[in-house]
Image: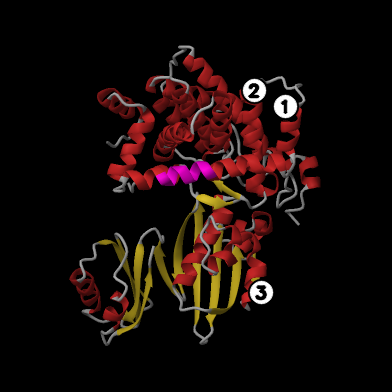
Protein backbone atom coordinates (compact mmCIF):
# COMPACT_ATOMS: atom_id res chain seq x y z
CA UNK A 1 0.00 0.00 0.00
CA UNK A 2 1.40 3.41 -0.95
CA UNK A 3 1.97 6.04 1.75
CA UNK A 4 -1.08 8.10 2.68
CA UNK A 5 0.17 11.53 3.71
CA UNK A 6 -1.62 13.78 6.20
CA UNK A 7 -1.94 16.16 3.24
CA UNK A 8 -3.83 13.51 1.26
CA UNK A 9 -6.38 13.71 4.08
CA UNK A 10 -6.15 17.46 4.75
CA UNK A 11 -6.02 18.21 1.06
CA UNK A 12 -5.70 18.72 -1.78
CA UNK A 13 -5.80 22.49 -1.56
CA UNK A 14 -8.18 23.10 -4.42
CA UNK A 15 -10.59 25.32 -6.27
CA UNK A 16 -14.06 23.85 -5.65
CA UNK A 17 -16.55 22.42 -5.89
CA UNK A 18 -15.55 18.80 -6.47
CA UNK A 19 -12.31 16.91 -5.94
CA UNK A 20 -13.15 14.54 -8.79
CA UNK A 21 -14.91 16.92 -11.20
CA UNK A 22 -12.84 20.07 -10.60
CA UNK A 23 -9.47 19.31 -8.95
CA UNK A 24 -9.09 16.00 -10.83
CA UNK A 25 -10.02 17.70 -14.11
CA UNK A 26 -7.42 20.43 -13.57
CA UNK A 27 -4.86 17.76 -12.79
CA UNK A 28 -5.58 15.80 -16.00
CA UNK A 29 -5.27 18.99 -18.07
CA UNK A 30 -2.03 19.82 -16.29
CA UNK A 31 -0.53 16.40 -17.01
CA UNK A 32 -1.66 16.48 -20.65
CA UNK A 33 0.13 19.78 -21.42
CA UNK A 34 3.31 18.41 -19.88
CA UNK A 35 3.45 15.79 -22.64
CA UNK A 36 3.59 18.13 -25.63
CA UNK A 37 5.87 21.05 -26.41
CA UNK A 38 4.14 24.40 -25.97
CA UNK A 39 2.77 26.82 -26.74
CA UNK A 40 -0.55 25.22 -27.64
CA UNK A 41 -2.71 26.63 -30.40
CA UNK A 42 -5.84 24.54 -30.09
CA UNK A 43 -7.34 22.07 -27.62
CA UNK A 44 -10.50 19.97 -27.94
CA UNK A 45 -12.02 18.26 -24.93
CA UNK A 46 -14.42 15.32 -25.25
CA UNK A 47 -16.25 14.57 -22.02
CA UNK A 48 -17.67 11.19 -21.05
CA UNK A 49 -19.95 9.79 -18.34
CA UNK A 50 -20.63 12.01 -15.35
CA UNK A 51 -18.21 14.59 -16.79
CA UNK A 52 -20.47 14.98 -19.83
CA UNK A 53 -23.62 15.47 -17.75
CA UNK A 54 -22.47 17.75 -14.91
CA UNK A 55 -19.41 19.54 -16.23
CA UNK A 56 -20.90 23.03 -16.20
CA UNK A 57 -22.13 22.92 -12.59
CA UNK A 58 -18.78 21.58 -11.43
CA UNK A 59 -16.61 23.97 -13.44
CA UNK A 60 -15.01 20.90 -15.03
CA UNK A 61 -14.58 22.86 -18.27
CA UNK A 62 -12.78 25.78 -16.59
CA UNK A 63 -10.63 23.39 -14.60
CA UNK A 64 -9.60 21.32 -17.67
CA UNK A 65 -8.73 24.45 -19.60
CA UNK A 66 -6.86 25.90 -16.60
CA UNK A 67 -4.89 22.70 -16.27
CA UNK A 68 -4.00 22.83 -19.96
CA UNK A 69 -2.54 26.29 -19.35
CA UNK A 70 -0.41 24.88 -16.54
CA UNK A 71 -2.54 25.96 -13.55
CA UNK A 72 -2.38 23.72 -10.48
CA UNK A 73 -5.53 22.61 -8.59
CA UNK A 74 -5.31 25.53 -6.13
CA UNK A 75 -4.74 28.28 -8.71
CA UNK A 76 -7.47 30.94 -8.52
CA UNK A 77 -7.01 31.68 -12.24
CA UNK A 78 -9.01 28.49 -12.95
CA UNK A 79 -12.18 30.53 -12.41
CA UNK A 80 -11.27 32.81 -15.31
CA UNK A 81 -9.61 30.26 -17.54
CA UNK A 82 -11.96 30.92 -20.50
CA UNK A 83 -11.04 34.62 -20.57
CA UNK A 84 -7.34 33.87 -20.05
CA UNK A 85 -7.29 31.33 -22.89
CA UNK A 86 -9.05 33.77 -25.22
CA UNK A 87 -6.47 36.44 -24.42
CA UNK A 88 -3.66 33.98 -25.15
CA UNK A 89 -5.25 33.07 -28.47
CA UNK A 90 -5.75 29.45 -27.42
CA UNK A 91 -8.74 27.95 -29.22
CA UNK A 92 -10.83 25.49 -27.18
CA UNK A 93 -13.98 23.40 -27.51
CA UNK A 94 -15.93 21.08 -25.19
CA UNK A 95 -17.98 18.21 -26.60
CA UNK A 96 -20.06 15.97 -24.33
CA UNK A 97 -20.22 12.37 -25.54
CA UNK A 98 -23.05 10.49 -23.88
CA UNK A 99 -23.15 7.64 -26.37
CA UNK A 100 -20.02 5.86 -25.25
CA UNK A 101 -20.85 4.39 -21.84
CA UNK A 102 -18.37 1.52 -21.51
CA UNK A 103 -15.82 3.84 -19.95
CA UNK A 104 -14.80 5.15 -16.51
CA UNK A 105 -17.55 7.63 -15.45
CA UNK A 106 -15.19 10.61 -15.20
CA UNK A 107 -13.21 10.43 -18.42
CA UNK A 108 -11.95 13.09 -20.81
CA UNK A 109 -10.12 12.94 -24.12
CA UNK A 110 -7.87 15.93 -24.75
CA UNK A 111 -6.77 16.61 -28.30
CA UNK A 112 -3.96 19.17 -28.40
CA UNK A 113 -2.33 20.97 -31.32
CA UNK A 114 0.76 23.11 -30.72
CA UNK A 115 2.01 26.07 -32.75
CA UNK A 116 4.35 23.91 -34.86
CA UNK A 117 1.40 21.71 -35.82
CA UNK A 118 2.26 18.71 -33.67
CA UNK A 119 -0.86 16.87 -32.45
CA UNK A 120 -1.49 14.61 -29.50
CA UNK A 121 -4.52 13.04 -27.82
CA UNK A 122 -4.45 12.10 -24.16
CA UNK A 123 -7.19 10.28 -22.24
CA UNK A 124 -7.47 10.87 -18.51
CA UNK A 125 -9.68 9.47 -15.77
CA UNK A 126 -10.52 11.25 -12.51
CA UNK A 127 -10.61 8.66 -9.78
CA UNK A 128 -11.85 10.71 -6.80
CA UNK A 129 -10.19 12.81 -4.10
CA UNK A 130 -8.20 14.65 -6.78
CA UNK A 131 -6.42 11.45 -7.85
CA UNK A 132 -6.19 10.86 -11.61
CA UNK A 133 -4.55 8.61 -14.13
CA UNK A 134 -3.63 8.91 -17.77
CA UNK A 135 -4.85 5.81 -19.60
CA UNK A 136 -4.16 6.57 -23.24
CA UNK A 137 -1.66 8.56 -25.28
CA UNK A 138 -2.69 8.76 -28.94
CA UNK A 139 -3.81 5.21 -29.71
CA UNK A 140 -1.74 3.43 -27.08
CA UNK A 141 -3.12 2.27 -23.72
CA UNK A 142 -0.92 3.49 -20.88
CA UNK A 143 -1.28 3.87 -17.13
CA UNK A 144 0.38 6.51 -15.03
CA UNK A 145 -0.73 8.79 -12.22
CA UNK A 146 1.45 11.86 -12.39
CA UNK A 147 2.30 11.46 -8.70
CA UNK A 148 5.90 10.75 -9.69
CA UNK A 149 8.20 12.32 -12.24
CA UNK A 150 8.03 10.26 -15.39
CA UNK A 151 9.92 9.59 -18.60
CA UNK A 152 7.68 8.62 -21.51
CA UNK A 153 9.64 7.15 -24.40
CA UNK A 154 8.19 6.48 -27.86
CA UNK A 155 10.32 3.87 -29.60
CA UNK A 156 10.44 1.00 -32.04
CA UNK A 157 9.54 -2.38 -30.49
CA UNK A 158 13.07 -3.82 -30.87
CA UNK A 159 15.39 -5.75 -28.54
CA UNK A 160 17.72 -3.68 -26.37
CA UNK A 161 15.75 -0.43 -26.28
CA UNK A 162 14.39 -0.90 -22.77
CA UNK A 163 17.81 -2.01 -21.50
CA UNK A 164 19.26 1.15 -23.03
CA UNK A 165 16.68 3.35 -21.28
CA UNK A 166 17.27 1.77 -17.87
CA UNK A 167 21.04 2.06 -18.35
CA UNK A 168 20.71 5.80 -19.08
CA UNK A 169 18.69 6.15 -15.87
CA UNK A 170 21.01 4.06 -13.70
CA UNK A 171 24.04 5.97 -15.04
CA UNK A 172 22.43 9.12 -13.64
CA UNK A 173 21.54 7.45 -10.35
CA UNK A 174 17.76 7.64 -10.96
CA UNK A 175 15.80 5.18 -8.84
CA UNK A 176 12.92 3.58 -10.76
CA UNK A 177 9.67 3.46 -8.77
CA UNK A 178 7.43 1.94 -11.49
CA UNK A 179 8.06 0.91 -15.08
CA UNK A 180 5.69 -0.23 -17.82
CA UNK A 181 5.99 -1.11 -21.51
CA UNK A 182 3.12 -0.84 -24.00
CA UNK A 183 3.07 -1.47 -27.74
CA UNK A 184 0.69 -1.14 -30.65
CA UNK A 185 1.81 -4.42 -32.24
CA UNK A 186 4.98 -6.52 -32.51
CA UNK A 187 7.91 -4.66 -34.04
CA UNK A 188 5.86 -1.45 -34.33
CA UNK A 189 5.68 1.65 -32.13
CA UNK A 190 6.04 1.02 -28.40
CA UNK A 191 5.89 3.23 -25.33
CA UNK A 192 7.95 2.83 -22.19
CA UNK A 193 6.88 4.77 -19.12
CA UNK A 194 9.26 5.02 -16.21
CA UNK A 195 8.20 6.70 -12.98
CA UNK A 196 10.97 7.74 -10.61
CA UNK A 197 11.48 8.87 -7.04
CA UNK A 198 12.34 12.56 -6.99
CA UNK A 199 13.04 14.93 -9.88
CA UNK A 200 14.72 13.67 -13.04
CA UNK A 201 17.97 15.21 -14.34
CA UNK A 202 16.99 18.01 -16.76
CA UNK A 203 19.03 16.65 -19.69
CA UNK A 204 18.06 12.99 -19.31
CA UNK A 205 15.67 13.31 -22.29
CA UNK A 206 18.49 14.35 -24.62
CA UNK A 207 20.64 11.43 -23.48
CA UNK A 208 17.89 8.83 -23.99
CA UNK A 209 16.91 10.31 -27.36
CA UNK A 210 20.34 9.43 -28.83
CA UNK A 211 19.44 5.76 -29.46
CA UNK A 212 18.55 5.07 -33.11
CA UNK A 213 15.33 3.21 -32.29
CA UNK A 214 14.03 5.91 -29.98
CA UNK A 215 11.73 8.44 -31.64
CA UNK A 216 10.67 10.73 -28.86
CA UNK A 217 11.21 11.34 -25.17
CA UNK A 218 8.87 13.27 -22.90
CA UNK A 219 9.84 14.28 -19.40
CA UNK A 220 7.04 14.99 -16.94
CA UNK A 221 8.56 16.58 -13.82
CA UNK A 222 6.51 16.54 -10.60
CA UNK B 1 6.35 5.81 13.92
CA UNK B 2 3.71 4.33 11.60
CA UNK B 3 0.34 2.85 12.54
CA UNK B 4 -2.36 0.91 10.70
CA UNK B 5 -5.28 1.33 13.10
CA UNK B 6 -6.44 3.29 16.12
CA UNK B 7 -5.24 0.60 18.51
CA UNK B 8 -1.66 0.93 17.26
CA UNK B 9 -2.00 4.71 17.32
CA UNK B 10 -3.02 4.66 20.99
CA UNK B 11 -0.10 2.35 21.81
CA UNK B 12 2.31 4.80 20.15
CA UNK B 13 0.76 7.69 22.13
CA UNK B 14 1.18 5.68 25.32
CA UNK B 15 4.76 4.54 24.59
CA UNK B 16 5.99 8.00 23.62
CA UNK B 17 3.72 9.95 25.97
CA UNK B 18 2.63 12.13 23.06
CA UNK B 19 -0.76 13.34 21.79
CA UNK B 20 -2.25 11.96 18.54
CA UNK B 21 -1.37 15.18 16.70
CA UNK B 22 2.35 14.82 17.43
CA UNK B 23 2.44 11.12 16.50
CA UNK B 24 0.80 12.01 13.16
CA UNK B 25 3.18 14.93 12.59
CA UNK B 26 6.24 12.76 13.27
CA UNK B 27 4.85 9.99 11.07
CA UNK B 28 4.62 12.49 8.22
CA UNK B 29 8.24 13.58 8.71
CA UNK B 30 9.70 10.08 9.15
CA UNK B 31 7.60 7.86 6.88
CA UNK B 32 6.89 10.66 4.39
CA UNK B 33 10.64 11.41 4.24
CA UNK B 34 10.30 15.15 4.66
CA UNK B 35 11.37 17.88 7.08
CA UNK B 36 9.91 19.46 10.16
CA UNK B 37 9.80 22.88 8.46
CA UNK B 38 8.12 21.61 5.30
CA UNK B 39 5.37 19.81 7.22
CA UNK B 40 4.71 22.78 9.49
CA UNK B 41 4.61 25.32 6.70
CA UNK B 42 2.27 23.15 4.63
CA UNK B 43 -0.13 22.83 7.56
CA UNK B 44 0.09 26.59 8.17
CA UNK B 45 -1.01 27.07 4.55
CA UNK B 46 -3.90 24.63 5.08
CA UNK B 47 -5.14 26.71 8.02
CA UNK B 48 -4.75 29.94 6.06
CA UNK B 49 -6.91 28.61 3.21
CA UNK B 50 -9.48 27.27 5.68
CA UNK B 51 -9.82 30.69 7.31
CA UNK B 52 -10.32 32.54 4.04
CA UNK B 53 -12.89 30.00 2.86
CA UNK B 54 -14.81 30.16 6.15
CA UNK B 55 -14.75 33.93 6.71
CA UNK B 56 -15.18 35.38 3.22
CA UNK B 57 -18.86 34.42 2.49
CA UNK B 58 -19.95 35.84 5.86
CA UNK B 59 -19.01 39.31 4.58
CA UNK B 60 -19.53 38.70 0.87
CA UNK B 61 -22.14 36.04 0.04
CA UNK B 62 -21.67 34.25 -3.26
CA UNK B 63 -24.07 32.29 -5.44
CA UNK B 64 -23.05 28.72 -6.25
CA UNK B 65 -22.22 27.51 -9.77
CA UNK B 66 -25.38 25.39 -9.86
CA UNK B 67 -27.47 28.16 -8.27
CA UNK B 68 -28.83 26.03 -5.43
CA UNK B 69 -27.06 27.74 -2.51
CA UNK B 70 -25.50 31.05 -1.45
CA UNK B 71 -25.94 33.54 1.39
CA UNK B 72 -26.59 31.03 4.20
CA UNK B 73 -23.45 31.94 6.17
CA UNK B 74 -24.32 35.63 6.26
CA UNK B 75 -27.86 34.86 7.45
CA UNK B 76 -26.48 32.76 10.29
CA UNK B 77 -23.93 35.37 11.23
CA UNK B 78 -26.58 38.12 11.37
CA UNK B 79 -28.87 35.90 13.41
CA UNK B 80 -26.03 35.26 15.86
CA UNK B 81 -25.22 38.99 16.06
CA UNK B 82 -28.87 39.74 16.88
CA UNK B 83 -28.53 37.71 20.09
CA UNK B 84 -31.45 35.46 19.10
CA UNK B 85 -29.33 32.35 18.50
CA UNK B 86 -30.32 29.22 20.39
CA UNK B 87 -27.27 26.98 19.88
CA UNK B 88 -24.73 28.81 22.02
CA UNK B 89 -21.62 30.61 20.89
CA UNK B 90 -19.39 27.71 19.79
CA UNK B 91 -22.02 25.87 17.79
CA UNK B 92 -23.49 28.99 16.24
CA UNK B 93 -20.08 30.04 14.94
CA UNK B 94 -19.22 26.49 13.93
CA UNK B 95 -22.28 26.00 11.73
CA UNK B 96 -21.75 29.46 10.22
CA UNK B 97 -18.18 28.62 9.18
CA UNK B 98 -19.11 25.13 8.02
CA UNK B 99 -21.84 26.45 5.72
CA UNK B 100 -19.60 29.33 4.60
CA UNK B 101 -16.87 26.90 3.52
CA UNK B 102 -19.32 24.95 1.36
CA UNK B 103 -20.52 28.24 -0.10
CA UNK B 104 -16.93 29.10 -1.04
CA UNK B 105 -16.46 25.61 -2.47
CA UNK B 106 -19.65 25.68 -4.54
CA UNK B 107 -18.68 29.02 -6.11
CA UNK B 108 -15.27 27.80 -7.29
CA UNK B 109 -13.39 29.31 -4.37
CA UNK B 110 -10.22 27.91 -2.81
CA UNK B 111 -10.76 25.27 -0.11
CA UNK B 112 -8.96 22.36 1.52
CA UNK B 113 -10.64 19.00 0.87
CA UNK B 114 -10.82 17.67 4.43
CA UNK B 115 -11.16 14.86 3.71
CA UNK B 116 -13.29 15.72 0.63
CA UNK B 117 -14.56 18.91 -0.98
CA UNK B 118 -18.17 18.07 -0.11
CA UNK B 119 -17.30 17.71 3.58
CA UNK B 120 -14.74 20.51 3.68
CA UNK B 121 -16.69 22.69 6.13
CA UNK B 122 -16.77 20.46 9.18
CA UNK B 123 -13.17 20.35 10.44
CA UNK B 124 -12.52 24.09 9.94
CA UNK B 125 -16.03 24.97 11.14
CA UNK B 126 -15.56 23.44 14.57
CA UNK B 127 -11.87 24.30 15.04
CA UNK B 128 -12.17 27.94 13.97
CA UNK B 129 -15.17 28.39 16.28
CA UNK B 130 -13.21 26.95 19.21
CA UNK B 131 -10.24 29.15 18.34
CA UNK B 132 -12.40 32.30 18.49
CA UNK B 133 -14.28 31.42 21.64
CA UNK B 134 -11.30 30.03 23.61
CA UNK B 135 -8.53 32.19 22.13
CA UNK B 136 -6.35 29.40 20.78
CA UNK B 137 -3.25 30.32 18.77
CA UNK B 138 -2.83 29.32 15.12
CA UNK B 139 -0.16 26.84 16.26
CA UNK B 140 -2.71 25.15 18.54
CA UNK B 141 -5.16 24.82 15.64
CA UNK B 142 -2.45 23.49 13.30
CA UNK B 143 -1.70 20.79 15.86
CA UNK B 144 -5.39 19.94 16.03
CA UNK B 145 -5.39 19.59 12.23
CA UNK B 146 -2.73 16.87 12.50
CA UNK B 147 -5.00 15.08 14.97
CA UNK B 148 -7.90 15.37 12.49
CA UNK B 149 -5.57 14.08 9.78
CA UNK B 150 -4.79 10.97 11.82
CA UNK B 151 -8.46 9.99 12.09
CA UNK B 152 -9.07 10.74 8.40
CA UNK B 153 -6.03 8.68 7.46
CA UNK B 154 -7.40 5.67 9.37
CA UNK B 155 -10.74 5.97 7.57
CA UNK B 156 -9.01 6.38 4.20
CA UNK B 157 -6.70 3.44 4.85
CA UNK B 158 -9.17 1.00 6.36
CA UNK B 159 -12.46 2.09 4.77
CA UNK B 160 -13.26 4.91 2.36
CA UNK B 161 -13.92 8.65 2.31
CA UNK B 162 -15.62 8.63 -1.10
CA UNK B 163 -19.38 9.26 -1.21
CA UNK B 164 -19.53 7.16 -4.39
CA UNK B 165 -18.25 4.17 -2.42
CA UNK B 166 -19.63 4.64 1.10
CA UNK B 167 -22.31 7.35 0.99
CA UNK B 168 -22.34 10.62 2.91
CA UNK B 169 -21.41 8.81 6.15
CA UNK B 170 -17.98 8.27 4.55
CA UNK B 171 -17.62 11.97 3.71
CA UNK B 172 -19.36 14.16 6.30
CA UNK B 173 -19.32 11.24 8.77
CA UNK B 174 -15.55 10.89 8.61
CA UNK B 175 -15.08 14.67 8.55
CA UNK B 176 -17.16 14.98 11.73
CA UNK B 177 -15.21 12.13 13.37
CA UNK B 178 -11.99 13.99 12.51
CA UNK B 179 -13.39 17.25 13.92
CA UNK B 180 -14.62 15.57 17.11
CA UNK B 181 -11.23 13.98 17.78
CA UNK B 182 -9.34 17.19 17.03
CA UNK B 183 -11.65 19.23 19.26
CA UNK B 184 -11.23 16.71 22.07
CA UNK B 185 -7.43 17.01 21.98
CA UNK B 186 -7.63 20.79 21.66
CA UNK B 187 -9.81 20.99 24.79
CA UNK B 188 -7.45 18.84 26.84
CA UNK B 189 -8.76 15.32 26.23
CA UNK B 190 -6.54 12.22 26.17
CA UNK B 191 -5.75 10.21 23.00
CA UNK B 192 -8.26 7.54 24.06
CA UNK B 193 -10.93 10.21 24.56
CA UNK B 194 -10.21 11.46 21.01
CA UNK B 195 -10.93 8.03 19.57
CA UNK B 196 -14.10 7.66 21.66
CA UNK B 197 -15.34 10.97 20.25
CA UNK B 198 -14.58 9.84 16.68
CA UNK B 199 -16.26 6.49 17.30
CA UNK B 200 -19.39 8.23 18.66
CA UNK B 201 -19.69 10.33 15.51
CA UNK B 202 -19.44 7.38 13.12
CA UNK B 203 -22.10 5.60 15.18
CA UNK B 204 -24.43 8.59 15.06
CA UNK B 205 -24.02 9.20 11.34
CA UNK B 206 -24.11 5.56 10.29
CA UNK B 207 -26.00 4.92 7.07
CA UNK B 208 -26.24 8.52 5.87
CA UNK B 209 -26.74 8.46 2.10
CA UNK B 210 -25.09 10.60 -0.59
CA UNK B 211 -27.85 12.12 -2.74
CA UNK B 212 -26.73 15.45 -4.18
CA UNK B 213 -29.39 17.34 -6.13
CA UNK B 214 -28.32 17.50 -9.77
CA UNK B 215 -25.13 15.66 -8.84
CA UNK B 216 -23.70 18.95 -7.58
CA UNK B 217 -21.77 19.50 -4.37
CA UNK B 218 -24.36 21.97 -3.07
CA UNK B 219 -27.59 20.63 -1.65
CA UNK B 220 -28.07 18.87 0.78
CA UNK B 221 -24.24 18.80 1.18
CA UNK B 222 -24.09 22.24 2.76
CA UNK B 223 -26.83 21.42 5.30
CA UNK B 224 -25.02 18.24 6.24
CA UNK B 225 -21.82 20.12 6.92
CA UNK B 226 -23.76 22.17 9.50
CA UNK B 227 -25.32 19.10 11.11
CA UNK B 228 -22.00 17.25 10.98
CA UNK B 229 -20.38 19.99 13.04
CA UNK B 230 -23.14 19.69 15.65
CA UNK B 231 -22.75 15.91 15.88
CA UNK B 232 -18.98 16.35 16.26
CA UNK B 233 -19.41 18.88 19.06
CA UNK B 234 -21.84 16.64 20.95
CA UNK B 235 -19.48 13.67 20.65
CA UNK B 236 -16.48 15.69 21.87
CA UNK B 237 -18.48 17.00 24.82
CA UNK B 238 -19.56 13.49 25.81
CA UNK B 239 -16.03 12.18 25.58
CA UNK B 240 -14.54 15.08 27.54
CA UNK B 241 -17.13 14.38 30.25
CA UNK B 242 -15.62 10.92 30.63
CA UNK B 243 -18.19 8.89 28.72
CA UNK B 244 -16.48 5.90 27.08
CA UNK B 245 -17.79 3.86 24.17
CA UNK B 246 -18.52 0.16 23.99
CA UNK B 247 -17.49 0.06 20.32
CA UNK B 248 -13.92 1.26 19.65
CA UNK B 249 -13.01 3.43 16.64
CA UNK B 250 -11.43 0.62 14.60
CA UNK B 251 -14.64 -1.41 14.76
CA UNK B 252 -16.78 1.63 13.90
CA UNK B 253 -14.62 2.36 10.84
CA UNK B 254 -15.11 -1.23 9.64
CA UNK B 255 -18.84 -1.04 10.34
CA UNK B 256 -19.16 2.25 8.47
CA UNK B 257 -17.40 0.68 5.46
CA UNK B 258 -19.58 -2.45 5.56
CA UNK B 259 -22.78 -0.40 5.77
CA UNK B 260 -21.53 1.90 2.97
CA UNK B 261 -20.96 -1.00 0.59
CA UNK B 262 -24.49 -2.24 1.30
CA UNK B 263 -26.05 1.06 0.24
CA UNK B 264 -27.70 0.77 -3.18
CA UNK B 265 -25.89 2.60 -6.00
CA UNK B 266 -28.79 5.10 -6.22
CA UNK B 267 -27.76 6.41 -2.79
CA UNK B 268 -24.04 6.74 -3.50
CA UNK B 269 -23.43 10.02 -5.34
CA UNK B 270 -25.26 9.07 -8.52
CA UNK B 271 -28.06 11.61 -8.01
CA UNK B 272 -30.57 8.85 -8.73
CA UNK B 273 -32.10 8.56 -5.25
CA UNK B 274 -32.84 10.33 -1.97
CA UNK B 275 -33.06 14.13 -2.01
CA UNK B 276 -31.85 14.18 -5.61
CA UNK B 277 -35.19 12.73 -6.74
CA UNK B 278 -37.45 15.01 -4.67
CA UNK B 279 -39.92 16.67 -7.09
CA UNK B 280 -39.22 20.15 -5.68
CA UNK B 281 -35.48 19.65 -5.97
CA UNK B 282 -35.78 18.52 -9.58
CA UNK B 283 -37.93 21.54 -10.37
CA UNK B 284 -35.36 24.03 -9.11
CA UNK B 285 -32.35 22.34 -10.66
CA UNK B 286 -31.70 22.28 -14.38
CA UNK B 287 -28.76 19.93 -14.48
CA UNK B 288 -30.57 17.04 -16.14
CA UNK B 289 -31.34 19.30 -19.11
Subunit of mark 3? A
Q: Secondary structure at mark 1?
A: helix
Q: Secondary structure at mark 3?
A: helix
Q: Quadrant of the N terminus of chain B?
A: top left
- Picture layout, residue A183 above or below residue A177: below
Quarter residue A86 falls in:
bottom right
Q: Is residue B45 magenta?
A: yes
Q: Looking at the image, which residue is at 31% across and 34% down?
A: B3
Secondary structure predominantly adopted by residues drawn in magenta: helix
Q: Looking at the image, which residue is at 62% across and 30% down?
A: B94
Quarter residue A189 falls in:
bottom left
Q: Nearer the viewer, mark 3 or mark 1?
A: 1
**Residue at mark 2:** B89
Subunit of mark 2? B
User: Horizontally, is A174 left or right of B66 in the view?
Assistant: left
Distance in Å between CA atoms under marks 3 and 1: 44 Å
Q: Nearer the viewer, mark 2 or mark 3?
A: 2
Distance in Å between CA atoms under marks 2 and 3: 48 Å
Distance in Å between CA atoms under marks 2 and 1: 8 Å
Subunit of mark 1? B
x, y percent for residue A75: 55, 58
x, y percent for residue A201: 29, 70
Within 10 Å of disc 3 (Cα), the crowding (few <14, some 14-19, many 20+) is few
- Picture layout, residue A162 above or below residue A147: below
Q: Is residue B47 magenta?
A: yes
- Magenta range: B41-48
Q: Any mark on residue B80, and which?
A: 1
Amino acid sequence: MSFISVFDVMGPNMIGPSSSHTAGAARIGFLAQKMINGPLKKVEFTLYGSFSRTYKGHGTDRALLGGIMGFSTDDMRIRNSFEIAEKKGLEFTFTPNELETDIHPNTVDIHMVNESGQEMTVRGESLGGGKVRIVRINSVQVDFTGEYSAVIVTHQDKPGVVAYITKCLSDRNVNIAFMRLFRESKGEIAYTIVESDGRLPEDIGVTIRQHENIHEVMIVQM
Amino acid sequence: MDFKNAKELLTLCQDHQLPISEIMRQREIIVGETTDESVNSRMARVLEIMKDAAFSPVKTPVRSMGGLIGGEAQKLSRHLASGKGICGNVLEKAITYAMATLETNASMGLIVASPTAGSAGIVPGLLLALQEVYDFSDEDIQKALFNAGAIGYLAMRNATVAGAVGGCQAETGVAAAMAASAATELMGGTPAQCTYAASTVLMNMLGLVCDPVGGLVEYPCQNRNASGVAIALVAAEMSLAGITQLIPLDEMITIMFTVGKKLPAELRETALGGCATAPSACESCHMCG
